[in-house]
Image: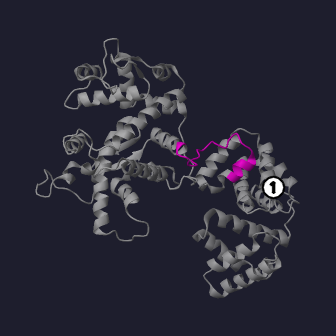
Amino acid sequence: MSDSSILPPARLRPEAELARDALSTPVLSRAARLARWAGPATRVDAGGGLVDEQLPDAAAELGLSGEDAAADASEAWRVAVDTGLVEVVDEEEGTVRAGDELSRLTGGSPQDVLSVWLGALETVLGDASVPDLGGLVDAIAGGEGSGELDLDALDWNPEAEAEFLDGVLGNLYLLTVGEDKAGDAPVPLPALAASVIVPDGMAEPSNDVLEQVSDAMMRLDDQFRMLEPVGLVEYQPVDEALMADADEEPAAPVDDTDVARYGLVRLTPLGLYGLRARLLEAGFEAPAVGDLADKGADALLDGTAAYPPAAAHAETEHWLERRRPLEAARELLAAARGSDEGAPLRRLRCQQALSLVGGAAEPALREVLDDAELGGLARVWLAEHGASDVPPPSEAMIFWLTVDTVAAQLAAEGNSEELRALVEGLARQHSGFFDTAWRVDHPATADVLEAMGRLHSDKKIAKEARKAAFKARSQQGG
């Protein structure tokens, strides 16, 4: 995914709701609790971590027990330090005090809370890219007694590991914001692992690639277990029985066809907010529905040109909510004019936006009935809304609107099956269509006719379309 890519728009929850979610996450709530617990007697080591003898008290403060209690308390403390909830006062003495971020977390705005949560997220993501502690100990021991980390022995590349996790989370983000509602359902872990391992165009993965996918699944299983407590994902881990050694008999029969046993992951609304913030920080163009609500109609029509239909619909509704219907209709129509390459799709988005305005837009549509670029669009709208006394369009206007519509669909969908059906319907309904169409004074006439020749299944009609396209291009001097 290139940082110049324009991603589909995310539908974010209100910041107040997201802030409440952030405050309730185990990672941040524990960090805040320890920040309030810390006092003059609290001591930290040279790295800012709680000294070992204070970990049991910290765990008790958090209500933690069991073999992982000390480790969980240590992680919570580190998040508190990394996010500024706790500040080290004297490094030599190892004394601490509550940080400025604690007051922002407890009494600040939703944006303040989310800012602190984003800091916690970065800490946890960094931890998730590090191998398990046992592997680290072995790697240090392998450094010939030097006490230095032997990355070669560990077979761990920090940058590659972080890039791998970023790639997986990027694909999860795309699935969540996609148009087909895939984000409403959890994603099977094997599919997510395969999305970053299997090369594009490989129909049947090789055994080597399948082994890489399996290894990636195990890494992701550990990582998503770590990322769930910070509120990034909802995760159903891989069934322990599936990870049993081949020589061991599982405690219960294993159903290999049950995809849920291989792990399921879903991005939370808070996680969607967090990943979008990271994408923006990395230079990606990651819009959110509502970004265009306070901008002009030109920005709305151009901005939603690349949006999937449902996202464009939602963005337009946000935009219309802030305007009076008639004024909005006039602004949309004015922005839809133009002979540039993007103009047909702008007019299509305008037509879709006007369908949401309602009958109050009628005066604006009547004002452009004689407009060469908008007259056909206006007649369609008025007819659909049952208006009376609408003058019939001329043949020239009908053909111009047809070319404009196909050009818009080409820009929006490419060579889709829906467009193929539209093209075949036009040729079937209008005998001699191509004899007239090549004369249409529209900048996209030749391109539209070429597309019709490419899309039509009847070879004879396709040839007629290509001939018409040649005539149109010759007439335009191209």
Report whether 17 appears left or right of 364: left
Assign the magenta stretch its main secondary structure. loop
**Residue 439 magenta-drawn?**
no
200 to 253, vertically: above or below: below
- Residue with the mark numbered 1: 387
Residue 320 image point, x, y percent:
70, 43
327 to 464, vertically: above or below: above
Q: Quadrant of the C terminus?
A: bottom right
- Type of amino acid under label 1: Ala
Hey, which residue is sitting farthest top in the picture? 40
Q: Residues within 10 Å of mark 1 (few under 14, many from 20)?
A: few
245 to 271, vertically: above or below: below
Q: Does the image show residue 21? A: no
Q: What segment is highlighted magenta in the picture?
A: 281-302
Residue 33 image point, x, y percent:
36, 21
Choose top left, top right, bottom left or bottom right for residue 377.
Answer: bottom right
38 to 320, vertically: above or below: above
